Image (spheres, coloured by chain):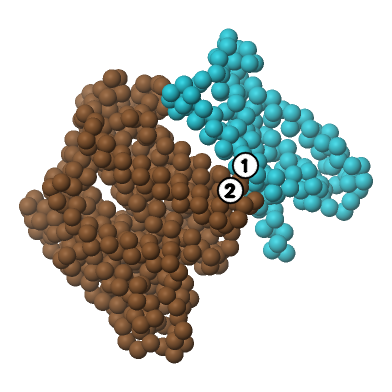
Chain colours: A cyan, B brown
Amino acid sequence: MNIKNQDSYTETGMTLIVKTVTRLTVGLILVYGIYIVLHGHLSPGGGFAGGVIIALSFVHLMLAFGRDIALRKVSKNTVSILESIGALMFLSIAIAGFLGGVFFLNILDKGSPFRLFSAGTIPLSNIAIGLKVGVGLFAIFLTLVILEGSKR
Amino acid sequence: MANIVPFFTIIPLFTAFAISLLGRIFKNAFIHTLSIVSQFILLVLSLLSSVLLHRFVDGKILVYKIGGWIPPFGICMVLDGLSSFMLVTVNLLAFFVAIYSLNYMNKYTDKPKFFTLFFLMLTGMNGVIVTGDLFNLYVFLEIASIAGYALVAFGTEAEELEASFKYAVMGSVASAFIFIGIAFLYGFVSTLNMADMARILGTKTNQWVLPFVSALFFMGFGLKAALVPFHAWLPDAHPSAPASISAMLSGVLIKALGIYALARILFNIFGILPVYSKILMFLGALSMLVAVVLALSQWDLKRLLAYHSISQIGYIALGIGLGTPLGILGGLYHLFNHSIFKSLLFLNSGAIDYAINSRDLKDMSGLRERMPITYHTNLIASMSIAGIPPFNGFFSKLIIIIACIQSGYITYAIAAVVGSLLTLASFMKVQKFAFLGELKEKYRDAKEVPLAMQLSMVVLSIICITGGLLLLPSLRYFLDNAVNVLLDGSNYANRVLETALK
């Protein structure tokens, strides 16, 4: 996450202890979320669960360091563009099925079971869903935070 | 030919996210073109589906297997007479509302967000109509409802946010009832495919779960359709939305999510039992009378129209609840007609709001001179909703009343006539206070609305005048195919499953 050291000592956010622990764990949470998304076709989890974990890593960052520092990593605009891209990506994977004649058809090579590169379009769909859910959930949290901030 | 079926959800979904992604980069012209073009394609596809289904398809049913999986295992989409009837109604209206919104939404900021939500709502409605899977129906229903909650709050004034919150709470309660109902039904029949559900329910001798599940569905879909004991959210939610969205909500949303889904489940999955039709008819007659009496005393133009939506939904429920061929014909025909004239009335109220910035009937007067197009289209729509002979509302109400008498429900027939008279009274009030009388000094320079808004109002009023032609023998198939699907009852299962295996 590469959060600059002086951020730990700024006024916003929680105490130094929370900030330090967050700095150590937030990357792990993000990587775990990505793992859940990419491994979705083999183990429990998938696009939705992994997307939620990815969103939580950013929420975690925002809680510990305050709104402005988290927004420096992912801006409001990026979030809303990525969300639309996630949805369009999922739709294009579904439409790509028409290449084989049927909507939502799994057109790619299925590979052998339990391999990371297998199951055709399922991992791709998981990535699209993970993107959509991750930024979508973060966008909801962001909206609540911004509205709360504008009320003061 | 079944390949056209998934496009009813693909096109609006794609348009929604394309607008949300590209709308911030390109100018309004791009958003306008994209919305109108994709809405036009949807309209053409739905009209085409209705004609093709009648002319070229055996059994008048198309089943699309998503991903190539056969129905009890995969999700399927079903396009039969009733679906194509609803698709034409929804997309016809959405096309004109989209044209109207091009100008009307200049009153608000952030057009890209509006069109994104608009097309998401359309995705939900089209999805509910074409899907053949009960859980899929629930998902699409939620998409349409949540887009609806956001659109009601689009103005972000205190009153609109309150209405939207109320709508969201009531809508979520309804969705919860529907969800629990689906869960119990799934537990009982172990399948979610609607056709397969009907088939398995037919083989069970002890259907103990049905009364409980149907009570949940009556509450859930009754809330979505705003039948009377469940109507309290509608008079707040519908007037608070932008006028073009009020037209969509009152015109088609409550019918696609409420009446259509309820009728599909009661008739095609459960197979209509006398007790269900009695409940549906009673709720219909109650809505008809209670809502129209409440409407009489309203002074807010859009609130008055919202109460009339509840009352007219009552006619539709009464007609469909009768369960006779004539009754269902009347109910569905009234569904089509009501979606046309009620959305026209809401678009008129939006035009008045656009011109003079007021919705209060006491405040406006003599607008006939300044806004001739709005006045004339409003006159046509008012006479249609009140059931004056040459207009479309007359024919459908007449059929419903005749059907009531034919099946021996004289009380309901009288209630329908009384409801119609009270409707006439309250629309005479609208005419008198809004358009006739002295023009007030402050509205001396009120202008007629822009061309796109005029265009969609004029075309809708032409449909109001010519709507009666749908009963002509050469056009009757549009309604008859829909009626036959409901009359077919749980035979729907065999038709879907046989077509799917072909």
In-image side of B212 versus B354 (left or right): left
In-image side of B490 versus B16 (left or right): left
Q: Residue B72 carries which label?
A: none
Quadrant for the N terminus of chain B in the image = top left
Chain of the residue where label 1 is placed in the rendered structure: A
Residue B212: image x %, image y %? 31, 39
Report the residue at 55% width, 44% height from top: B17
Report the residue at 39% width, 53% height from top: B94
Task: Answer whether labels 1 and 2 touch (C-beta < 8 Å).
Answer: yes
Q: Nearer the viewer, residue A124 or A31?
A: A124
Mark 1, mark 2: which one is toward the viewer? 2
Which residue in the protein does label 2 denote? B20
Residue A107: image x %, image y %? 51, 20
In-image side of A19 versus B492 (left or right): right
Report the residue at 82% width, 36% height from top: A1
Work out whether B318 lies above or below B452: above
Quadrant for the C terminus of chain B in the image = top left
Three-letter amino acid code at the position of disc 1 = Glu
Three-letter amino acid code at the position of disc 2 = Ser
Work out whether A64 lies above or below B389: above
Q: Quadrant of residue B156?
A: bottom right
Q: Which mark is residue A83?
A: 1
Residue B162 appears in the rendering: no
Q: Nearer the viewer, residue B165 or B480?
A: B480
Question: Is disc 1 placed on a helix, strand or loop?
Answer: helix
Work out whether B181 lies above or below B195: below
Report the residue at 58% width, 9% height from top: A112
Residue B308: image x %, image y %? 30, 65
